[in-house]
Image (spheres, rainbow, N blue to C red):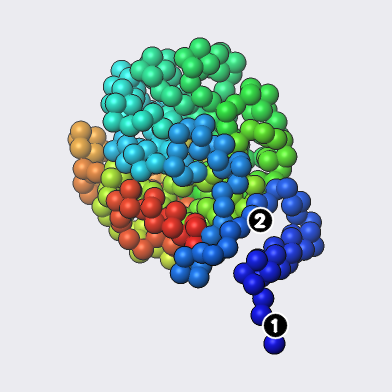
Amino acid sequence: MTTKTDDEDSSRRNFIRKSVAVGMGITLNSIDVSESVGHEDGKEKVDLSDKAKKLMALFNLKYPIFQAAPGGDALAIAVSNAGAMGAMALTSSTPEDAYRRVTSVKEATHGNFYVNYILHFDPSSLDKALEAGAPTVQFSWGIPDKTMVSKIRAANAKLGIQVASKDGAKAAVDLNPDFLICQGVEAGGHVQANDPLMGTLGDVLEVAKNIPVLAAGGIATGQGIRTALKAGASGAVLGTRLIATQESEIHSEYKNALVKAGDNSTVFTICFDKGWPALHRVLKNNTFQRWESAGCPLPGRRPGENDIVAIRPNGTNVERYSVQPPLEGFRGEITELAMYAGQGVKNIKDLPSAGDLILRLWKEFENK
């Protein structure tokens, strides 16, 4: 009786996987099927693609993992110092606040972080963020104009643009960005996409050619990162999984709600629209359920519309249906507010430190 060697088994697995890919109409050059043998604990490990290595070298990373913008500065620092790419949301920051925050995060990290602007709003603090030394600027919900791009290039900063379609990718590529983020409708928060991630990623990769593309939307595990990279992405963007950490600035009751969430816990809706009437994915809560049971009425006819459900640390009120998520220091009916979450929330079972989480995700990535 003959026995197969590890190399023969590996070759056979690769042949099967390639044959399946061809049968599904997937081009092999979009999937990294490289693997190594002789693995620890009998588990299979996959080598990083050249695309992922290029991304990591570009931003001085240990891991091809980007944080989505929400979460606060402490989280950005923790993610960066763990070897991934931290993120700062600056859309609502004043120029002075942006300068202070960027300076602080830059001093606490090796510069592997980016600042994000939502282009449904004026990026009024961009100049001061660049003056403070923001190393990378990423835009979502729009394509930056040439003046913005010129300022970023003049500051020797890198440029990223989030897209959600082939046409969006074409418009972004015309500006010669350093990277693209391809978002799928599975994402949490205000969702630019209308289609599933894996239905869009191939189109964006085709347009991007040699420009690194990161996958975003519903990714919360190392296996999810692995799937994105196998589909041709250079890296993965994680939002919900990273705000469910000790360093995140969101309220503890919000964090606990993320941990308790299950398979059917999120909804893609227009419910929480005070401040920004855009589609978003949130955890289902009492505010949403009351609104839905009333027939999803328009503003002016919604149940409890003028209720004050929480108070910020500065004493200002937060009304029901506000876009404001509950942050540290908020008081009141915390879980009545918008608790943004992607479809990957079902995989969140604890609240580790960001550093421990990054290491865990990478172990999951490496081992099937």
* Front residue (pair 75, 254): 75
Tell me what residue is drawn at x 37 percent, y 38 percent.
80
Question: Which mark is first along the chain, 2 or 1?
Answer: 1
Which residue, given by chain and number where applicable, does mark 2 sit on? Answer: 33
Disc ID at residue 2:
1
In the image, taking residue 77 as reference, residue 210 lies left or right, namely: right
In the image, residue 225 sits, relative to residue 82, either above or below, namely: below
* Residue 362, x across and y down, in percent: 44, 53
Tell me what residue is drawn at x 52 percent, y 46 percent.
236
The three-letter amino acid code for the residue at tag 2 is: Val
In the image, residue 90 sits, relative to residue 65, either above or below, namely: above
Tell me what residue is drawn at x 33 percent, y 19 percent.
99
Residue sticking out furthest to the bottom:
1
Tell me what residue is drawn at x 26 percent, y 52 percent.
252
Tag 2, which secondary structure?
Answer: loop
* Residue 31, x across and y down, in percent: 68, 51
Asked where in the image residue 206 lies, by quadrant, the reply is top right
